Amino acid sequence: MKKITFPISEEQLMDLKAGDRVLASGYLYTARDAAHKRMYELLQKGEPLPVDISGQTIYYVGAAPAKPGCAVGPCGPTSSYRMDKYAPSLLDLGLKVMIGKGMRSDEVINSIIKNKAVYLIAIGGAAALIAKSIKKSELICYEDLGTEAIYRYEVEDMPLIVGIDSIGGNVYVR
């Protein structure tokens, strides 16, 4: 089990290999379909994003409402393919880590390699377990999107698996 910290250092990122199990701590952003669409539209207009994603991590999630005393409610990963249209543009801006579940398109895989990034898998069906790793949640923007707004999470020992590494190693391909 490898321990990593977000934002991830280049050294940690390059050390990750497809299939590695990791425990991640630090800060990451959340964004699902609607937030990705808005960010993509801003980029198409040549406008800045509401958050600087260079060197950052995005978790494809929309957490359920938090119970008293908890930072978030259950927050399992969203199917990543739904963000494939937007991911290459964000990777080109310096996004280093994406967290979700499921396979990625060839275009996204090529962009991961080109931009020396990584795709981590959060285990579907483990939403309550993952929520225990989230220590703090802060709304960043797009409040009108509800659970699909962009949040900043502080995580501690979030269990993940390296799905696609920075050189194209891929757990979905044998």
Image: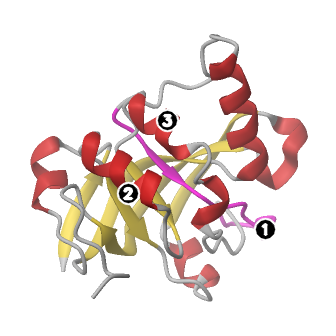
Q: Position of residue 18 (x, y in %)?
A: 23, 74
Q: What residue sits right under mark 3 in the picture?
A: 90
Residue 28 % position (x, y): 47, 47
Question: How many discs appear?
Answer: 3
How far separated are the C-alphas under marks 3 and 2? 13 Å
- Amino acid type for the residue under numbered disc 3: Leu
Q: Is 145 located above or below residue 147 in the figure? A: above
Q: Amino acid at mark 1?
A: Ala
**Residue at mark 2:** 109
Q: Residues within 10 Å of mark 1 (few under 14, many from 20)?
A: some
Q: Mark 2 vs mark 1: give the one in front.
A: 2
Q: Residue at x 42, y 27 (%)?
A: 93
Find residue 119 and report its image quarter.
Answer: bottom left
**Residue 108 screen position, x and y as percent:** 45, 53
> From the viewer's perspective, is residue 112 above or below residue 70?
above
What residue is drawn where x is 75% and y is 32%? 38
Which residue range is magenta in the image? 55-70
- Is the N terminus in the top left, top right, bottom left or bottom right quadrant? bottom left
- In the figure, residue 19 lies in which quadrant? bottom left
Q: How is the image coloured?
A: secondary structure
Q: Kindly state the secondary structure of the residue where label 3 is placed.
A: helix
| Amino acid found under the numbered disc labelled 2 | Ile
Question: Of marks 2 and 1, which one's residue comes earlier in the chain?
Answer: 1
